[in-house]
Image: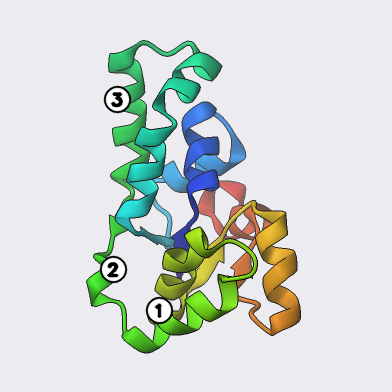
Amino acid sequence: MRIVVDTNIAFSSILNTNSKIARIILQPRSRLNFYSTEQLKREIEEHRLKILALTNYSEPELDRVIELITRKIRFVNIELISKQSYMRAISLTQDIDVDDAEFIALTEHLRGWFWSGDKELRDGLLPKGWDRFISTSELFDKTKFNR
């Protein structure tokens, strides 16, 4: 199953590596395939100081945790996403949060599922007929350690 990871999901797993979200990402025998764009890495770096303050990680510890989480995610160059998928994503997100367009475009392109905790985005996209969201609970139910 192809899962596009939103930045807020990666943040959550970095903030608490023992959380349900982190356990899903780090599960070694998972049949879930995680994807994102480089935007996720950029946003993590933009909020690095905030993450350090919230976690009390040292710089090297934070680097290790980020590496641990991001190595489980396949990063797709946005230039490989079809123009049709990207344009559709922009039209869907322009009145909600156009910063999420890359993630929506990648989800469309991969014909995958979008894993996000962004309620405002979800509430904005569902009435437009875009329902490719998957929840943490649904993913947790699909993982082997939950059996």
CB contact under 8 Å: marks 2 and 1? yes
Question: In the rendered structure, which disc, 1 or 3, sits on the residue that comes first in sequence?
Answer: 3
Please state which of the two labelled residues, at mark 3 or mark 2, is closer to the viewer: 2
Looking at the image, is mark 3 or mark 2 earlier in the sequence? 3
Q: Which mark is residue 27?
A: none
Describe the element under mark 1 as helix, strand or loop.
Answer: helix
Q: In this orientation, does residue 17 appear?
A: no
- Tell me if mark 2 has few (under 14), some (14-19) or many (20+) residues whose alpha carbon lies within 10 angstroms of its own: some
Task: Name the residue tied to disc 3.
Answer: 63
- Choose top left, top right, bottom left or bottom right for residue 129: bottom right
Q: Which residue is mark 2?
A: 78
Within-10-Å neighbours for mark 1: few <14, some 14–19, many 20+: many
Q: Position of residue 36 (x, y in %)?
A: 37, 59
At 54% across and 66% down in the image, what residue appears? 114
Q: Is residue 104 left or right of residue 96?
A: left
- The numbered mark, 2 or 1, whose residue comes first in the sequence reads 2
Q: Nearer the viewer, residue 38 or 115?
A: 38
Q: Is residue 86 above or below residue 15?
A: below
Identify the mark at residue 86; answer none if there is no mark. 1
**Gap between marks 2 and 1, in whole Å?**
9 Å
Rendered view: 30 above or below 56: below
From the top left corner, tell me how far across and down residue 97 is, in percent: 58, 61
Q: Real-space Cα distance between discs 1 and 3?
A: 31 Å
Q: Secondary structure at mark 2?
A: helix
In the picture, measured across the screen, residue 57 lies left or right of residue 79, that is: right
Q: Quadrant of the N terminus?
A: bottom left
Residue type pointed to by label 2: Ile
Look at 64% across and 80% down and name the residue there: 130
The amino acid marked with disc number 3 is Asp
Give the residue drawn at x 28%, y 44%.
Answer: 71
